[in-house]
Image (cartoon, coloured by chain):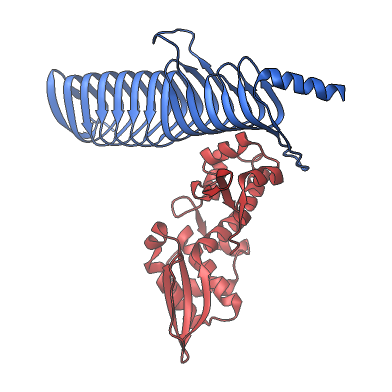
Chain colours: A red, B blue
Amino acid sequence: MDDTLMSKKELLERTNISYGQLYRWKRKNLIPEEWFIRKSTFTGQETFFPREKILNRIEQIKNMKDDLSLDELADRLTANASNVQLSIRDFTERNIVTSAAVELVQAHDPSKKIYSFDDMLCIYVVDVALQSGEVNQNECRSFIEMLELNYAKLRSVACSISLVRKLGVGMCVMYPSKSDVTFDKSAKVVLTLDLEQCAEELRLKLL
Amino acid sequence: MDADNLQLSGVGAATGGTYHRVEMQGVSRIHGDVTCLDCKVEGVSEIHGHVRASTIDVRGKSKVYGSIEASRVAVEGSSLVDGDCRASLMNIRGDVRIHGDVAAQELDVHGRVIVKGSCDAEAFVCDGAFQIEQMLNADTIDVRLARSSKVQEIGCTTIQVKRSSIGRFGPRKSRLSVDVIEGDDIVLEWTRANVVRGNRVVLGMGADVELVEYQSDLILEGNARVRTKRQVNHSGASETKMEMIETADELQSATRNEDQI
């Protein structure tokens, strides 16, 4: 994940937006409060933004603001369990994920017809894992189980999920992204996914 | 929903709940959250809980130990909210203290508002004084100072700060103190700021700014003071001209010199 920051000044120059627009979008929650990062520099207090995220977001807003009202746009961009629901057909038709991922999740709970954002995130994570070629279907099942049990946790703290393999046996671990997790030397961390970033990517795809 | 009305008059107390109308007259207290269409308070009241209403009308003194969510809030007197306040329209004639954040479409204050968090509004109008601990983020800001005011940061599209023409509070020493103001169209009088950034900046009487960064215009009037001014071009090429200018007179002679060259 691109961690580099960009200053507010540079942002306005690059994107050619005004202070009025920036603050209006902030009021409407189109730009999350957390992205406004205050740091002390030699010139005093300055505000910075996560570079990739903010540039992408401003691009999205500029593209869509003529078609949608700012409030509708805010709903779409802050997609979460409460406001997005898709039937499984919509999901596959839009080619957001591979059918293999969908089938795997469906097999886990065949009775489910309407998928919430959390469920879609689960499918998306499984899709990324499968496509990486590093994770097999069985191990993906443990991802699905892990996610289904811990959706609530995701809301309070940004988490990452890792698949760790030792002596041919895979294990799934979920932990707060900011924490420093050390695994057994003989264990191999096969794949790590930042769930916050996955959610962001998924939101972009659903727009 | 066929909910009952809650009416308290004289000296009374009640439990919260869901009602059609809530009327509190005299000295009254409600324990628990209140959800209703109209909430009318006359006298001295306390609500120990959150209030969700369509309209809240306070005439007197009210304390809400919780957050408020309403379409319309009108206060004539004084009000304390120990929580956040979210409303479409907030009309204050008196003194309101909010120990949380404020979010409104229109916030119209004739008197004083004190916010311990941040204040978001589309239109912020204040004729009197205000104190906002964190940020004032509003589309249009129209301030007429009667008493000194303070806010950490301002983000806006347009802002105008002047002194109230009605000198109700004796010697007029009212000033607005801000750390940073960023907006598109900025007109300031009687404002002390560290940094002002805008497209078009007009500084008038009593304006005292450490650093101004403007894109198209900087106009200094009266006894406005700027320590450092810098023109910044936001569309592509960044051209920075940094000069130390003390007063409007110096600015005038500086620009006159430029014309001659």
Q: Residue at x 43, y 68 (%)?
A: A179
Can residue A115 be spotted in the picture? no
Residue A206, given in percent of the width and then of the height, sits at 58, 56
Residue B58, given in percent of the width and then of the height, sits at 29, 20
Residue B7, given in percent of the width and then of the height, sits at 19, 22
Q: Quadrant of residue A66?
A: top right
Q: Residue at x 69, y 45 (%)?
A: A15
Q: Residue at x 27, y 21 (%)?
A: B40
Q: Is residue B148 rendered to the left or right of residue B9?
A: right
* Most foreground residue, B163 or B101: B163
* Most foreground residue, B158 or A191: B158
Q: Quadrant of residue B28?
A: top left
- Compared with residue B58, is residue B242 higher up or lower down, i.e. above or below? below
> Which residue is most to the right?
B261
- Compared with residue A109, is residue A23 higher up or lower down, i.e. above or below? above
Can residue B212 be spotted in the picture? yes
Q: Is residue A79 rendered to the left or right of residue B48?
A: right
Q: Is residue B129 rendered to the left or right of residue A59?
A: left
Q: Is residue A78 rendered to the left or right of residue A184?
A: right
| Quadrant placement of the C terminus of chain B | top right
Q: Quadrant of residue B230?
A: top right
> Which residue is most to the left?
B11
- Compared with residue B140, is residue A120 higher up or lower down, i.e. above or below? below
| Quadrant placement of the N terminus of chain B | top left
Residue A138, given in percent of the width and then of the height, sits at 47, 82
